[in-house]
Amino acid sequence: MQSLGLGRACNPGRFCRRTALPSPPPPPPPLRSLGRRGRSLASGRAVRINAGATRSAQMAGTQQHSEEQVRMVRLRAVEATPESFAPFGQVIAASPDGDQFGPHDAQLDLSRGIPRFYIMRLENRPLQFSSITHHASVTQCLGSIGSQDWYLGVAKPSIVEAPEQSGGEEGRKPVQSRAGHYYLPPDPAEVCVFRVSGPKFLKLHRGTWHAGPLFKADAVDFYNLELSDTNVVDHTTHYFKKQDGITFVIED
């Protein structure tokens, strides 16, 4: 913040030359008295105006202070491969027709509701995020139509069976989701970003934290496999900006 100029002061120990001022003009004629009620109204209006200005200044200062506390963390995207993405889910690529089902196929859990497979159009999703979400009741599959490149921020699943379970680092304690289950808030230091290129899709483990899809294009269509009510009853979100003072920016 730039300092405000408060005028030039005299240097200590130096003589400040004073210029003679002309005689002051005669005082203006007195104003007509407004009476006790008029004075009270004018005084009250001044008090209200000054109080409002003080509150506005305080709110502006608080907002600016909050914005200054947010830290930008830059993450380098890495290519999603079956090996690099294994802690978070699977990378599924094309396989020859006639291949038998095996571990290279998406290992799905759609047993807790009605599966929903649909095309999802997303617009204006730049390469940054300040919140992250998980689904506790389903494995989710995402892939871009047309094999356009896209990005996903992720963190490992952190669902716990009971609130007594600990294991959280840096004092992170179990939290109960609105969906009813308990989880450990994701550690910002463990968040990473993957780039998905070419004709492949991601299957997310149940409970994997994810932010995205994000992309450089104006709009991208994705096919999405989850449950029919996932976005209604199974959508737990952690807000890094609000709770950790962090916003992530993807570099690629």
Image (spheres, rainbow, N blue to C red):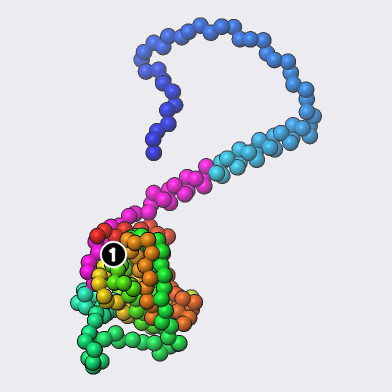
Q: Eyeballing the image, is 1 above or below 98?
A: above
Residue at image position (41%, 73%) is 120
Location of residue 57 in the rendering, given as x and y in whole percent from the top left corner: 52, 42
The part of the image, by quadrant, that contains residue 241 is: bottom left
- Looking at the image, residue 212 sits to the left or right of residue 41; the answer is left
In this view, the residue farthest toward the left is: 83
Count of labels in the image = 1
| Within-10-Å neighbours for mark 1: few <14, some 14–19, many 20+ | few
Q: Is residue 67 magenta?
A: yes
Q: Is residue 168 visible?
A: no
Location of residue 88 in the rendering, given as x and y in whole percent from the top left corner: 28, 76
Location of residue 65 in the rendering, given as x and y in whole percent from the top left corner: 43, 48
Residue at image position (28%, 64%) is 189
The quadrant of the rendering that contains the N terminus is top left
Location of residue 174 in the rendering, given as x and y in whole percent from the top left corner: 39, 74
Tag 1: residue type? Ala
The part of the image, by quadrant, that contains residue 234 is: bottom left
Viewer-proximal residue among 60 and 146: 146
Viewer-proximal residue among 123 and 17: 123
The quadrant of the rendering that contains the C terminus is bottom left
The residue stretch that appears in magenta:
57-80
The part of the image, by quadrant, that contains residue 173 is: bottom left
Q: Is residue 90 magenta?
A: no
Residue at image position (49%, 45%) is 60
Q: Please, what secondary structure does the residue beneath circle 1 have?
A: helix
Viewer-proximal residue among 57 and 229: 229
- Looking at the image, residue 200 sits to the left or right of residue 129; the answer is left
Q: Which residue is mark 1?
A: 189
Q: Is residue 27 visible?
A: yes
